[in-house]
Image (cartoon, helix red, strand yellow):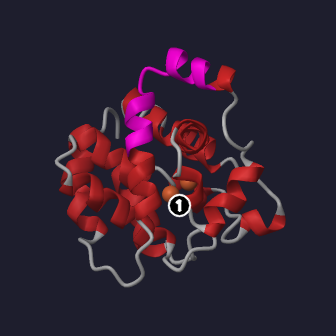
Amino acid sequence: MTIVDQIIDLLSNHGGDLYFGEQVTEAEHALQCAHLASQSGAEPNIVAAALLHDIGHLLHGLGENIANHNIDGKHEDVGSVWLQGHFPQLILDCVRLHVDAKRYLTATEPGYLEDLSLASKKSLELQGGPFSPQEITEFEANEPFYKEAVQIRRWDDEAKVVGLKVPPVERYRELLESVVISK
Ligand SMILES: [Fe+2]
Ligand SMILES: [Fe+2]
């Protein structure tokens, strides 16, 4: 199977667990996130990153509700490492940084933390909480794609609408093929 086949298989057949204490499944969350990116006119790399940002949840086998067991599965690293070699750095970094982007936004944007869902607030604690001033500076200085990661984070936070109809994963096959660097 090519990497794109594997991604489509994961989201089609293994994305049925509820997403991290929310009322949508992992697959619904990924597809809503990609759809929001696509609707905003984002370039294919960004749409792909939105689709793939939580792929680590489908890979590490810990399933749903890991925050409730006080385990930080580091799904952002699991996902990014799995995609390495197949997708450009922008996508890998957006996947790897989507948790840090939440920590960044909670520290820099008034009201952001309050608006997070309960599950997202809960996982934030395990993920280290809001960035310190030094972490903010380092994030901006050391991560060339931090703005893209922050943008994806905003769609990530919105992509939890129960029952929302969005295009299926097959609709992203061509887009994924267009950004892949090695099958
Ligand atoms: Fe995530
Ligand atoms: Fe997510």
- From this viewpoint, which residue is outermost toward the top? 141
Q: Quick check: is 115 in the magenta stretch?
A: no
Of the pair 31 and 107, the residue shown nearer to us? 107
| Mark 1, secondary structure of its residue | helix
Q: Is mark 1 within 8 Å of ligand 2?
A: no
Q: Is residue 1 visible?
A: no
Instruction: Name which residue lies at 63% across and 50% down.
Output: 75
* Picture layout, residue 124 above or below residue 30: above
Q: Could you say where residue 52 lies in the image, as x and y percent from the top left? A: 42, 51
- From this viewpoint, which residue is outermost toward the right? 70
Q: In which quadrant of the rendered image does the N terminus lie?
A: bottom left
Instruction: Write down the region rendered in magenta.
Output: 136-151
Query: Which quarter is ligand 1 in?
Result: bottom right
Q: Main secondary structure of the magenta part?
A: helix
Q: Quadrant of residue 160?
A: bottom left
Q: Is residue 85 visible?
A: yes
In the rendered image, which residue does mark 1 sit on? Answer: 115
- From this viewpoint, which residue is outermost toward the front? 110
Q: Could you say where residue 23 lies in the image, as x and y percent from the top left? A: 53, 80
Of the pair 82 and 57, the residue shown nearer to us? 57
The answer to whether residue 16 is left or right of residue 123 is left
The answer to whether residue 126 is left or right of residue 93 is right
Instruction: Name which residue lies at 62% across and 60% down.
Output: 120
Of the pair 1 and 157, the residue shown nearer to us? 157
* Picture layout, residue 91 above or below residue 33: above
Residue kind at label 1, given as amino acid type: Asp
* Picture layout, residue 2 above or below residue 168: above
Q: Could you say where residue 121 lies in the image, as x and y percent from the top left? A: 66, 59
